[in-house]
Amino acid sequence: MSRAYHYSALTRFPQMLNSGHLLPYAGIHLEMPLVMFSAHPFWEPTATKPCRTENALVNLKFWEYRDLFGCIRFALPADDSRLLTWREVCNQVGLSRIDRRKLEAAARKRGGDPKQWFAVPTAIPLVDMSLEILSINEWRTVS
């Protein structure tokens, strides 16, 4: 069965656990709060966030991000009715075609593929998903 994953830093897990949910987040370009998912089977490249140093915002390589923050992912079945495709999300939030293409081009430069993107506009209970933690380069299921 194929799955969609919400990729995140292990350092954010305590906050997620305390809330009991994955909570929607409004990003810079999308005003509507969403929980983003990817069908990428190992790691969604756009999930590797920049790191702030004393002087600048630094783009990290995946392995640097993994070693600094740890990696986790929550999985939903790809046919979960809550998942919206990237195109559906853009239509719902009223993102213009030009802005959508700019976001997609920037993501492709980082290795992302918008065809693999999905989102849920509401909080998702953690009990509805499976959890995996990345151990070196192997995902391990956590019960």
Image (tube, rainbow, N blue to C red):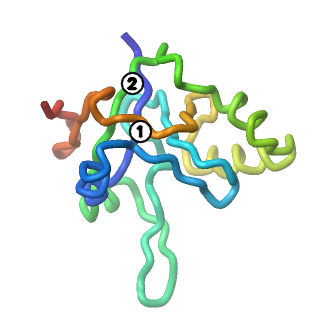
Return the disc, 2 or 1, that comes first in the chain's sequence: 1
Residue 88 against residue 12 in the figure, above or below:
above
Q: Quadrant of residue 92?
A: top right
Residue 27 against residue 88 in the figure, above or below:
below
Disc 2 packing (10 Å; few <14; some 14–19; many ≥20): some
Left or right of 131: which side holds 28?
Answer: right
Query: Would you name the residue on which mark 2 appears?
Result: 76
Instruction: Give the quadrant of the C terminus.
Output: top left
User: Label 2 amino acid?
Assistant: Leu
Residue occupying the point 34% across, 59% down = 65
Residue occupying the point 25% across, 53% down = 18
**Whole-percent x, y for residue 58 in the image:** 48, 73
**Whole-percent x, y for residue 126 in the image:** 30, 36
User: Label 1 amino acid?
Assistant: His
**Whole-percent x, y for residue 31 in the image:** 69, 54
Toward the bottom, the furthest residue is: 55
Left or right of 103: which side holds 138?
Answer: left
Disc 1 packing (10 Å; few <14; some 14–19; many ≥20): many
Contact check, label 2 and label 1, Cβ < 8 Å: yes
Residue 87's tag is none
Residue 118 against residue 51 in the figure, above or below:
above
Residue 69 against residue 134 in the figure, above or below:
below
Nearer the observer, 5 or 105: 5
**Whole-percent x, y for residue 11 in the image:** 26, 60
Query: Label 1's element?
Result: strand
Query: Would you name the residue on which mark 1 appears?
Result: 6
Q: Quadrant of residue 63?
A: bottom left
Left or right of 75: which side holds 86?
Answer: right
Residue occupying the point 15% across, 34% down = 142
| Residue 105 appears in the figure | yes
Instruction: Give the quadrant of the N terminus.
Output: top left
Nearer the observer, 105 or 103: 103
